[in-house]
Image (cartoon, rainbow, N blue to C red):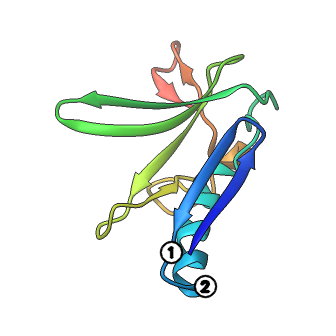
């Protein structure tokens, strides 16, 4: 079964699924990363997908084109899927729904 889904006004995704369960699983995974429609820091809706490499590590992020804040995505240990990083290393919820900005003065993401 082929299904088209428009998670954002400027983005159309097509799924090729074996059945309803397969379709549901595919859509659930993509909605988690594609439905983020505004910056958690400033509320701007002009977001871009970025992928950068540093020391052979890939970093996947949504970036706000207004304030420069980012929402990072982690990679599941198995499979080829991503998830939004909304918790810190101690598993505490991050402010601003996980959106952070680099602070030059403290040399840290806040």
| Residue furthest to the right | 43
Q: Quadrant of residue 79?
A: bottom left
Q: Tell which of 6 and 98 is nearer to you.
A: 6
Please say if 67 is above or below 88.
above
Q: Would residue 36 be found to the left or right of residue 74 on screen?
A: right
Q: Residues within 10 Å of mark 1 (few under 14, many from 20)?
A: some
All told, the count of numbered labels is 2
Q: Residues within 10 Å of mark 2 (few under 14, many from 20)?
A: few
Q: Would residue 53 be found to the left or right of residue 88 on screen?
A: left
Q: Quadrant of the C terminus?
A: top right
Give the secondary structure at mark 2. Answer: helix
Give the secondary structure at mark 1. Answer: loop
Please say if 27 is above or below 66.
below
| Residue furthest to the front | 1
Q: Tell which of 40 and 16 is nearer to you.
A: 16
| Residue furthest to the top | 105
Q: Quadrant of residue 71?
A: top right
Measuring from the top left, give residue 94's x and y in whole percent: 63, 50
Look at mark 2 in the image and give the residue it sits on. Answer: 20
Q: Tell which of 97 and 44 is nearer to you.
A: 44
Residue at position x 56%, y 75% from top? Answer: 1
Measuring from the top left, give residue 82's x and y in whole percent: 44, 57
Measuring from the top left, give residue 45's x and y in whole percent: 78, 30
- Asked if labels 1 and 2 touch by Cβ distance under 8 angstroms, the answer is yes
Label ID, residue 17: 1
């Amino acid at each position: 079964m082929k299904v088209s889904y428009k998670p954002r006004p400027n983005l159309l995704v097509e799924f090729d699924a074996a059945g309803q369960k397969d379709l549901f699983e595919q859509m659930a995974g993509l909605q988690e990363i594609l439905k983020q429609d505004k910056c958690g820091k400033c509320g701007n809706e002009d977001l871009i997908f970025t992928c950068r490499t540093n020391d052979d590590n890939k970093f996947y992020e949504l970036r706000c084109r207004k304030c420069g804040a980012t929402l990072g995505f982690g990679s599941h240990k198995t499979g080829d899927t991503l998830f939004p990083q909304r918790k810190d290393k101690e598993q505490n919820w991050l402010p601003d729904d996980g959106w952070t900005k680099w602070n030059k003065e403290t040399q840290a993401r806040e």
